[in-house]
């Protein structure tokens, strides 16, 4: 019997070649089920982890050709994941650099500079400069835009909402007689005399005018996207989800993958035109369902679809259970205004049924608590018809900033996942607290309740513009997001935003690793450091579990491995 066991052990050893790489004498934060801490890790030539354990255990597996890396006591952990990015952000500054704008004066100075380098009649525009982040906490007025650009149409856009100057209103056909198109949830704000103020809510502006901005070629887009992904690697990101992607964008990722230039694992969710006539909407979903990239693949896989259920929290159009309240900052003068609902309940149910039946992840941009409530109630109705389908498809809520306690309980029961951006608390908590007050802000990003009730929440950034992890809109530095979820600290605010909703350090790391792996249908291969999984690993300059909490933001990634291959090394 003993001889048989010895023979089996020898055969087993002979079938497994010695590891190609061993990282040893470090602190290996595995983020496995038990959050085990090890000392060393071995990686096979195929990029998968073969052993995790003590130095003695792992070093015993080394062979003559094994590459050895002494970690010198430093910490390694799984590659971080961002559940929500928009890689088109790489092209924002293709024409020119856009400065950081923190005041109305900054905005007007930037637009004035653009007027100087444009011809009369050229469209001048700026996007994603959120009023919650401006010192004055308001839109530039139509009159202010007229003053700096009397001969150019100007559009100041904050996402779904825009402020236009007089020439832009004229070119777009926005007069006192303008009627919002049937089926649109948008709104044109007017003053006491019925004249447009310039503010359009959830209306895609129809300003047709030339622009002096140069156009990018396909090669330009490819090059800058590669550059962005390398910067993702530099802050520890090894997997990202492109929310509201397109099948054309997926072709770009496929090309990068084929050429060996894709340095992050990509999980796209193509956008669907949710309020088109149903045949067109169904056709768009079928094109996603039938796409070859929906096949399981750890490097590049379409995981689902995305739609927009409401407007924006930062722009005053998120759909809330209670009225927003009168606000000069947001331009709200209707005391009953609750935000913008973009999809009818009937259409939402059609969409969820179609996508979920195919086993794909449905998600909807749902910022306000009313939008979150409707989406989760819709999941409940669909799951009632086909029990377990919502959980199996990893059905999700995107943003999920305000959550009623009932919605959290239902999400837990149904297995609904949450794609949430802690960075918004840090960037916008001051303005939101000032507007909504302490009581309503208790529902803002209630991560503690989600974790306590076993709702899988994943951390993201909603990166929209610029390359640079701190200068981007929104900042995609995951260490800032991790720190924010632990401290609940908002910039320029002297106390945390409901500290009872904070996470522990371990939970915050799960937010960007194992939880995101589950949310993004990648947990078989990534999200933790365990034998058999892909060696997506980062080496950092401090211990994220024990360093002074406010030093966590400054964490530097020293090296990033993707499937055992180095994709970033700090010089």
Image: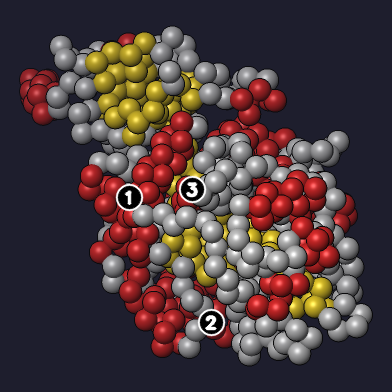
**Which residue does the numbered mark 2 point to in the structure image?**
275
Question: Could you tell which of marks 3 and 1 lies nearer the N-terminus?
Answer: 3
Pick whichever, 518 or 260, lies toward us: 260
Task: Answer whether labels 2 and 3 touch (C-beta < 8 Å).
Answer: no
Residue placed at 48% from the left, 58% from the top? 243
Question: In the rendered view of the protein, which quadrant contains the C terminus?
Answer: top left
Image location of residue 173, percent across then percent down: 67, 83
Question: In the rendered view of the protein, which quadrant contains the N terminus?
Answer: top left
**Which residue does the numbered mark 1 point to in the structure image?**
219
Above or below 102: residue 335: below
Find residue 251 and name its label: none
Cα distance, mark 2 to mark 3?
32 Å
Mark 1: secondary structure: helix
Cα distance, mark 3 to mark 1?
12 Å
Mark 2: secondary structure: loop
Cα distance, mark 2 to mark 1?
34 Å
Pick whichever, 548 or 62, lies toward us: 548
Question: Could you tell which of marks 2 and 3 lies nearer the N-terminus?
Answer: 3
Q: Farthest front residue?
A: 120
**Which residue does the numbered mark 3 point to in the structure image?**
94
Task: Answer whether labels 3 and 1 touch (C-beta < 8 Å).
Answer: no
Above or below 464: residue 564: above
């Amino acid at each position: 019997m003993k001889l048989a066991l010895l023979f089996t052990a020898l055969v087993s050893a002979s079938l497994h070649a010695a590891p190609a790489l061993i990282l040893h004498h470090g602190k290996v934060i595995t983020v496995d089920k038990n959050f085990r801490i090890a000392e060393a890790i071995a990686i096979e030539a195929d990029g998968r982890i073969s052993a995790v354990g003590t130095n003695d255990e792992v070093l015993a597996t080394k062979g003559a050709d094994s590459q050895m890396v002494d970690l010198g006591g430093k910490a390694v952990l799984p590659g971080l994941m961002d559940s929500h990015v928009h890689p088109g952000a790489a092209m924002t500054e293709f024409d020119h650099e856009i400065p950081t704008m923190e005041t109305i004066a900054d905005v007007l100075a930037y637009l004035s500079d653009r007027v100087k380098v444009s011809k009369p009649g050229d469209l001048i525009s700026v996007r994603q400069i959120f009023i919650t982040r401006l010192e004055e906490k308001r839109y530039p007025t139509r009159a202010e835009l007229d003053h700096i650009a009397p001969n150019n149409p100007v559009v100041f856009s904050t996402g779904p909402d825009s402020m236009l100057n007089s020439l832009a209103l004229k070119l777009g056909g926005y007069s006192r007689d303008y009627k919002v198109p049937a089926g649109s949830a948008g709104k044109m704000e007017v003053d006491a005399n019925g004249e447009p103020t310039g503010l359009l809510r959830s209306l895609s502006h129809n300003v047709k005018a030339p622009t002096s901005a140069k156009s990018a070629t396909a090669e330009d887009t490819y090059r800058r996207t590669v550059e962005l992904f390398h910067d993702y690697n530099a802050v520890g990101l090894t997997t990202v989800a492109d929310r509201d992607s397109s099948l054309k964008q997926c072709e770009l990722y496929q090309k990068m993958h084929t050429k060996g230039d894709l340095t992050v694992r990509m999980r796209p969710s193509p956008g669907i035109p949710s309020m088109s006539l149903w045949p067109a909407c169904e056709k768009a979903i079928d094109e996603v369902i039938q796409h070859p990239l929906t096949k399981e693949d750890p490097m590049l896989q379409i995981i689902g679809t995305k739609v927009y259920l409401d407007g924006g929290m930062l722009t005053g159009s998120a759909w809330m259970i209670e009225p927003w309240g009168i606000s000069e900052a947001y331009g709200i003068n209707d005391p009953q205004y609750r935000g913008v609902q973009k999809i009818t309940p009937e259409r939402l149910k059609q969409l969820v049924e179609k996508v979920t039946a195919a086993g794909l992840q449905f998600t909807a941009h749902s910022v306000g608590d009313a939008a979150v409530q409707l989406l989760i109630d819709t999941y409940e109705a669909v799951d009632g018809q086909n029990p377990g389908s919502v959980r199996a498809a990893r059905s999700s809520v995107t943003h999920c900033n305000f959550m009623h306690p009932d919605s959290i309980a239902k999400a837990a029961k149904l297995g609904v996942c949450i794609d949430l951006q802690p960075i918004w608390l840090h960037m916008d908590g001051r303005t939101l607290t000032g507007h909504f007050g302490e009581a309503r802000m208790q529902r803002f990003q209630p991560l503690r309740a989600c974790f306590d009730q076993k709702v899988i929440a994943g951390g993201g950034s909603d990166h929209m513009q610029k390359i640079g992890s701190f200068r981007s809109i929104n900042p995609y530095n995951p260490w800032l997001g991790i720190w924010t979820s632990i401290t609940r600290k908002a910039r320029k605010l002297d106390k945390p935003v409901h500290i009872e909703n904070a996470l522990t350090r371990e939970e915050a790391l799960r937010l960007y690793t194992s939880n995101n792996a589950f949310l993004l249908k990648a947990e078989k291969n990534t999200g933790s450091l365990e034998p058999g999984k892909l060696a997506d690993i980062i080496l950092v300059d401090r211990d994220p579990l024990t360093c002074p909490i406010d030093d966590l933001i400054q964490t530097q990634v020293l090296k990033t491995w993707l499937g055992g291959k180095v994709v970033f090394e700090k010089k």
